[in-house]
Structures are given as C-alpha cells and as structure tokens.
Image (cartoon, helix red, strand yellow):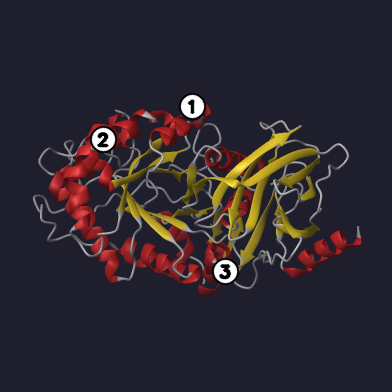
Amino acid sequence: SIPLLLAYLTCALGSPCAKRFYIANQFVCVCNATYCDEYEQTELSSNIAVVFSSSEDGDRMNRWTLKLNKHAKLLKDSSKIKIDPRVTYQEIIGFGGAFTDAAGINIMSLSESARERLMETVYGEKGARYSTGRVPIASTDFSTRIYSYNDNTGDENMNKFALTAEDENYKIPLIVRALNLTGGDFRLFSSPWSAPAWMKETGKMEGPGKLKKGLEKAWAKYFVRFFEEYFVYGVSFWATTVQNEPTSGALPSYAFQTMYWNATGERSFASAYLGPALAASKASKDIKIIGLDDNRLWLPEWANLLYSDPEASKYIAGVGVHWYMDGFTSASKLIATHEAHPDKFILATEACSGSSFPHHGPAFGEWARAETYARSIIEDLNNFVAGWTDWNLALDTKGGPSWVRNFVDAPILVNATADEFLKQPIHYAMTHFSRFLRPGAKRVQSSTIGIDNTRVMHTAFVFEGQRIVVILNTLSSEQPITIEEAAGTSIDVKAAPKSI
C-alpha cells in the first residue's frame, strides 16, 4: 500500500545501513567518522503500532507504522499471538555488553569522531540504548597481558592496590561516556577472573586453582578497593559477581585466568567476607552480589545452595548464567530456579558467537549468528531471565586482541586502519531487545495459535503503557501474524523470511 511504501522510503532516506557485502546476502553496516546508520524513534500515537524489522535479506531496523484493528481479525492464512498485559512476570534489568580491555583498545584506536559514533550507536537515543555493562576486575583472556591490581605478596590490607593503564586509558573513559549517553539509566556489574597470583594456591593467575585458605578477607578487600578506585572517577556499580565461570577453575587444562569456587564456597565467602566488606564502604555499600556467573547446567542446585543460608541470601540478590552449554541443557532449569526463589533474579551475564570449533572468530555479515542471539534471548526471557549481557562490546576484525588467542565474534568489529567499524547482524539482534525492553519493562502472558513455536518465537512485554512484542521468524518464508491484545484490539504483521 502507499502508506507502507512511504514509510519505507522515509526510512531509506533517513540514515540507512551502509552495506558492505561479503558472500551472497551476508553484509555488515559500515560506520566511520562522518556516517553511521541511526534508528528512528518509536513515537507511538493513538491507535498506531510501529514495526521495526531486521532480516537476512537486507532490513536493518527498518521502520513502518500500522493501524490497530478495533476488533480482532485474522489475516488470511494468518497465525495468532495473543497477549494479556494483565498477567505480568519478571521485570527487566537490562541489556548490554562487556568493557573488556580488548573492547577498549579497539574503540580507543578510532579517531575521536568515529569513536563517538560507535558509542552513540551502542548507548545513544538513536542507537541500541544498552542499559547494562559488565566490567572485568583486572585482566581476562581478552587482555593483552596477564595482570592484577596488587602483585605485592603479603599485602593483605591492599595498601598497594592500584588500577592499571588499562582501566585509566580504556575502561573508565568509555564507561563515563556510556553513563553520560544513557543519562545514568545504566547498571554496571563487575566480575573477577582470578585473584593475584600470590593469593592463589597455584601461584599463578592463569590455569586452575583455588584462593589460598586464610586470604578470604584480603580477597574481599580487593573487591572493595576496586570499587573505591572507580568511585573516584564518578563510576558506581550496581552489582558484582563472585567469580567468572567458577567451575572452570577445576579444569586441569584451562588456559587463561580463572579461580575455582563451588556453590558452598561462594555462599560462605559472600556471607562472611564479601557481603560485610561491601556494606562497610561508601563506594560499595549498595552493591548486590550475583552468584554462579557460569553455565545454567549448574542450576537449580547451585542457587538452592547459595540461598539455603539466610545470611548469604541477605547479600546474594541473584544468579548469572552464561549461554555456552545451553544446547545441552534445558531451559526448564531456569524455571525451576525461579519457582524455588521467586524473590531472586536470574541475569544472563555472558554470551558470544565464534567461540567454539570449527567456527572461531568473526563471521562477517552472517545472519545465522543474529538468529542464534535472538533465539537465546527470547528463550531466556520466556523463562524468567531479567536481562542479557553480551561479551566484548567490540573486537578487531580477527576477533581480538586476546593474549591467549581466544578469538571470537562481537556485535561491532573495528577496522582501525580505515578508521571505521562494522556493525554485525548480531548488533541488530541485540538492538531489537535493548532498544525497546527498557529497565523496568515487565514480561506479560502470551500464547499462540497456529504457530510452530520452535521456528517462530516471540516474547511480549509492557512498559510505560506500551505493549512490546519481539518476534523471531527462522523460516525461509514470510509469516502473516495477527497480534491480539486481551482487550480485543489487534494488528496484522507480516514477518519477513529469516527476520526479527
């Protein structure tokens, strides 16, 4: 129809994706110091719905409007999604990515103008509007070296604790800019990969091993000193995890920084040391503790153990889950965890594509990875997860740097030589959630008629009077869908082949 055509033309004449093709229909959107595609505002008015579409065939946040039907009707051959905003579930914490050293190195390698465009496309009003950020405590596999904040053996009071150039040159400037762009509507949480080498039983940060007995108080102090140093720069944290992937610290061949905890160890450390230490400092007194921060394989047992001690439960507000073993574990583990502990949150704290054999590193313009992200996010949200934080915010075109050469993909790839950055399909997958499912949005009850929910997935939310439905069509054919609200109004949409 003419209105639909005009809407598409408006989008195309605004600031569309500057496409760079690789093979067939695989393309990235290229941004530089002078240009980057922007996403139009929602601007809902009475009886109007706004649709944003990204697809394998070429859409990238294309926008058009539809009129609401006063009385529900079905398109010919249409399937139905029915939403009931009167029945609500979990509240959104947020969506975002991690301020790794690798991300910082890449973003800061751009000219000031290109860097600002990147930050605006991730955090700005016309961008993805990320609302969470994960900050590593010291080095990770996505650092260029192994380092801690205190290599002074025996300094248990952390008198010689000091941030590094990585914090001062990369992490902090970008975090401060993100805070400014989001107007403070932004939740930061931290994660340590390892204690300093002298505090581990093995005497080295990389590889398996536990915290030395008797150093629990010193290790808790290390956390507090981290928050105090960041506080000086005006950066406050919402939460911290106890340990990144604590179970990896038991793997004999583990190649990079880690430290082992089991659930009872995390529980004891949180209740006796970390919780009280955080509460005693102005910089960290409001910080929540997140347990697990590992694959959902360990749920619900890990959560049951964490919360079994009332003192630990007082400090531990929720659990973090990674996606790396989701293919081998049922999402029913998330439901079981929520049902046993409805007052605690579940937050997805890490995911990335390109981390496993045989497809290590970036896949330029590959839609399948966007689909994998959207599928994971929808599955998590529909099973009581309150938000989803990706891994590296940006990497170079090889998927690094990484001192251990653990190259992976990222939503944004930086080509510093050309002073440009490439927005991967996974950036747009993230944007369909982060831009519209704002902190405080609540999931609502929804059901389907005539839809194969394994191929056409959806999730539904309410926020400030809006009803928001995100649909993933993994089929190679267009899917006519009627979305009907309990009150009787409806809209008829056509989900393009392979689209969000």
Q: Quadrant of residue 260?
A: top left
Q: Nearer the viewer, residue 454 or 146?
A: 454
Residue at 70% across / 36% down in the picture?
448
**Disc 2 versus disc 3: nearer the observer:** 2
* Separation of marks 2 and 3 at Cα, in angstroms: 40 Å
Q: Nearer the viewer, residue 137 or 480?
A: 480
The picture places residue 53, in percent across and down from the top left corner, at 72, 52
Between discs 2 and 3, the one toward the N terminus: 3
Q: Residues within 10 Å of mark 2 (few under 14, many from 20)?
A: many
Q: Amino acid at mark 1?
A: Thr
- Which of the two marks, 1 or 3, is nearer to us in this view? 1
Q: Which mark is residue 261?
A: 2
- Check disc 1 and report its element: helix, strand or loop: loop
Q: Is residue 25 visible?
A: no
Instruction: Answer left or right for 219 relative to 166.
Output: left
Instruction: Please name the amino acid that badge 2 sits on.
Output: Trp
Other residues around mark 1 within 10 Å, as few (<14) / some (14–19) / many (≥20): some
Q: Is residue 42 above or below residue 248?
A: below
The residue that label 1 is drawn on is 329
Q: Which residue is mark 3?
A: 117
Would you say 481 lies left or right of 392 here?
right
For marks 2 and 1, the one nearer the N-term is 2
The disc labelled 3 sits on which kind of residue? Arg
The location of residue 383, given as percent across then percent down, is: 52, 37
